[in-house]
């Protein structure tokens, strides 16, 4: 049993991670400024003896009383429309927020776990992407506010590890989906499901031939815990290596929902990566972890969630 601080605790991944930690008997102090996170993701934990929520912006100094065994730093806008709407805040939480979270871990002698992203690979020229690939990121394009924030996050984390001996873990997350994504989050899985349930056209950006690899949230969180609990610093890719075009994803969503929504093509966002698939060799060999939920099963579970929350 450990006492764990989770930043971004009211977010999609932060709240699922909190549930998994509490389920195994850990105590969780959850911090979030609610800029993209939502209290309803934590409402079921009201009164839980191991759980505390503090509304706090981690770009400001983080004060937590008492011992802390691990700091899990997940705070950041993460969907493209989310970080494009909050560009400076995204850079600040990746830089100042990460600095504060690392400072807390160092002061408490705690392990530091941080969520990085497949976006550090940018529009990759190596496929699939192993952790050893340094990426192809436009440093001044609109997406740079997220990509460079996360690259800086990794650099600062490694600097604290080398300079101050902080025990760190870096996970590179590939497109993850599931219950508690926001209906207006803007990512492709939630967009398609919400559109299908409402009988609206599925919006495909560009010709739909670009690929992503979609990981169901339960698999992703299990991967986080394997990395957190193990001895490897990372970075380690955690995602699903099944690769789909957006046209194929639209078809899966139409099949699962039984929707006959038409496809509507909209312009491709600037610097949208053409392909993405994790090389999971390290995750499999070092963590003994691999994803287990097939896309159609995960989409079905996510459809069930949205069907229950949509007005
Ligand atoms: N996309 C799409 N329709 C949507 C939302 C996204 O075709 O309604 C595309 C987007 O252009 C990208 C892919 O789906 O090629 C994944 O987008 P998402 O925003 O989910 O995540 P990303 O991997 O780009 O961060």
Image: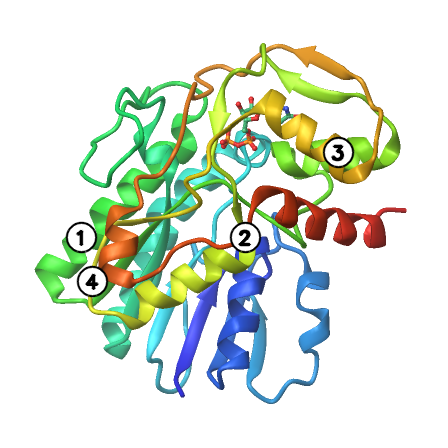
User: 33 or 12, which lies in front?
Assistant: 12
Q: Distance between the residues labelled 4 and 2?
A: 25 Å
- Rendered residue at 80%/32% (across/down): 196
Q: How far apart are marks 1 and 2 (CA)?
A: 32 Å
The mark that comes first in sequence, 3 or 4, is 4
The mark that comes first in sequence, 1 or 2, is 1
Q: Which mark is residue 99?
A: none
- Rendered residue at 74%/16% (across/down): 263
Residue 82 quadrant: top right
Residue ranking furthest to the left: 163
Q: Residues within 10 Å of mark 1 (few under 14, many from 20)?
A: many
Residue ranking furthest to the right: 311
Is the C-beta separation of discs 1 and 2 under 8 Å?
no
The mark that comes first in sequence, 1 or 4, is 1
Q: How far apart are marks 1 and 4 (CA)?
A: 13 Å
Closest to the camera, between mark 1 and mark 3, is 3
Residue indicated by mark 4: 232
Q: What element carries label 1?
A: helix
Residue indicated by mark 1: 158
The mark that comes first in sequence, 1 or 3, is 1
User: 299 or 44, which lies in front?
Assistant: 299
Closest to the camera, between mark 4 and mark 2, is 2
- Rendered residue at 12%/67% (across/down): 165
Q: Which mark is residue 255?
A: 3
Residue indicated by mark 2: 293
The mark that comes first in sequence, 4 or 2, is 4
Q: Distance between the residues labelled 1 and 3?
A: 44 Å
Residue 193 quadrant: top right
Give the quadrant of ligand 1.
top right
Above-or-below relation of 231 to 26: above
């Amino acid at each position: 049993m450990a006492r764990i601080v989770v930043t971004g605790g009211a977010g999609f991944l932060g709240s699922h991670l909190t549930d998994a930690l509490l389920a195994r008997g850990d105590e969780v102090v959850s911090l979030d400024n609610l800029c993209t996170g939502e209290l309803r993701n934590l409402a079921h934990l009201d009164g839980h003896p191991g759980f505390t929520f503090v509304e706090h912006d981690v770009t400001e100094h983080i004060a937590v009383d008492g011992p802390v065994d691990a700091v899990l730093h997940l705070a950041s806008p993460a969907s493209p429309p989310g970080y494009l709407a909050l560009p400076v805040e995204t850079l600040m939480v990746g830089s100042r927020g990460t600095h504060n979270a690392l400072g807390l871990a160092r002061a408490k002698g705690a392990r530091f776990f941080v969520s990085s992203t497949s976006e550090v690979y940018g529009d990759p020229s190596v496929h699939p992407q192993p952790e050893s690939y340094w990426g192809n990121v436009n440093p001044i394009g609109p997406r740079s506010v997220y990509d460079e924030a996360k690259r800086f996050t990794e650099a600062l984390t490694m600097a604290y590890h080398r300079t101050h001996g902080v025990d760190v873990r870096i996970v590179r997350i590939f497109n993850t989906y599931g219950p508690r994504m926001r209906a207006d989050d803007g990512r492709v899985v939630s967009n398609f499901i919400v559109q299908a349930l409402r009988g609206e056209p599925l919006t495909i950006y560009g010709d739909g031939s670009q690929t992503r690899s979609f990981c169901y949230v339960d698999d992703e969180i299990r991967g986080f815990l394997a990395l957190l609990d193990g001895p490897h610093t990372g970075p380690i890719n955690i995602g699903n290596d099944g690769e789909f075009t957006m046209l194929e994803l639209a078809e899966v969503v139409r099949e699962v929902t039984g929707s006959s929504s038409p496809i509507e093509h909209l312009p491709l966002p600037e610097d949208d990566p053409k392909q993405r698939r994790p090389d999971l060799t390290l995750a499999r060999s070092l963590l003994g972890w691999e994803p287990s939920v097939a896309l159609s099963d995960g989409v079905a579970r996510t459809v069930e969630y949205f069907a229950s929350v949509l007005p």
